[in-house]
Image: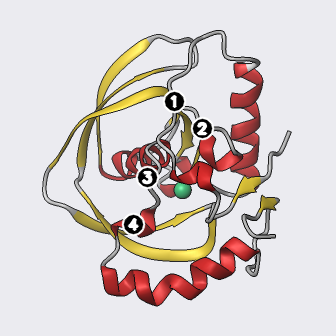
Amino acid sequence: MILPIYSYGHTVLRKKAEDISPDYPNLPGLIADMFETMYNASGVGLAAPQVGLGIRLFVVDAEPMDEEKLAGFKKVFINAQMLEESGHAWAYSEGCLSLPNLHEDVLRKPTIRIRYQDEHFATHEETFEGLAARVIQHEYDHIEGVLFTDHLSGLRKRLLKGKLNAIAKGDCDARYRMKFALR
Ligand code: NI
């Protein structure tokens, strides 16, 4: 089932999300719906707060970004904790399904070490680099209540204020189902 994606302006996108346990109601169904919602919107990652749930869950499938290097990079992250981010920060143009049609260069470190549980609640501690790390960092931010625009300079943020307010009101052209904060 395709879920509506919550726009910029919803408070759920600004809260630190909570851990979940394996008995979370209908978790396999929710994960399947999140993948379906993400693919429908041509996204490469989707976090639970973006479908209105303040829980530490996000899904990624970054294969479309690089069909060779990221082939099969489809994963579920539950109760993730970032352990380390390292290296020299690099810029990459990011977008977000909660902020349609907005793309800005964001600086992030290239290597991460993260602990998480998969959809079977097996615990993993892994290192990711480059674009894989980038997608995870963006989604991890969502479960910490952070949006990619928070990483921009004060000037850039001020310049984007009007656009962000328009998104919250639904005054934007999204090609997928959304739930706008101020509509
Ligand atoms: Ni996002």
Q: Which residue is mark 1?
A: 18
Q: CA distance from mark 4 to mark 3?
A: 11 Å
Give above or below for 84 relative to 21: below
Q: Position of residue 148 (x, y in %)?
A: 43, 63
**Residue at 13%, 59% in the rendered image:** 88
**Callout in the foreground (3, 2):** 2
Q: Earlier in the sequence, mark 1 or mark 4?
A: 1
**Residue at 72%, 64% in the rendered image:** 181
Q: Which mark is residue 150?
A: 4
Q: Which mark is residue 54?
A: 2
Local secondary structure at mark 1: loop
Give above or below for 97 relative to 142: below
Q: Position of residue 174 (x, y in %)?
A: 75, 71
Give above or below for 40 relative to 71: below
Local secondary structure at mark 3: helix
Q: CA distance from mark 2 to mark 4?
A: 19 Å
- Which amino acid type corresponds to the residue marked 4 in the rendered image? Asp
Q: Position of residue 3 (x, y in %)?
A: 80, 46
Does the Cβ of the disc 3 residue fall within 8 Å of ligand 1?
yes
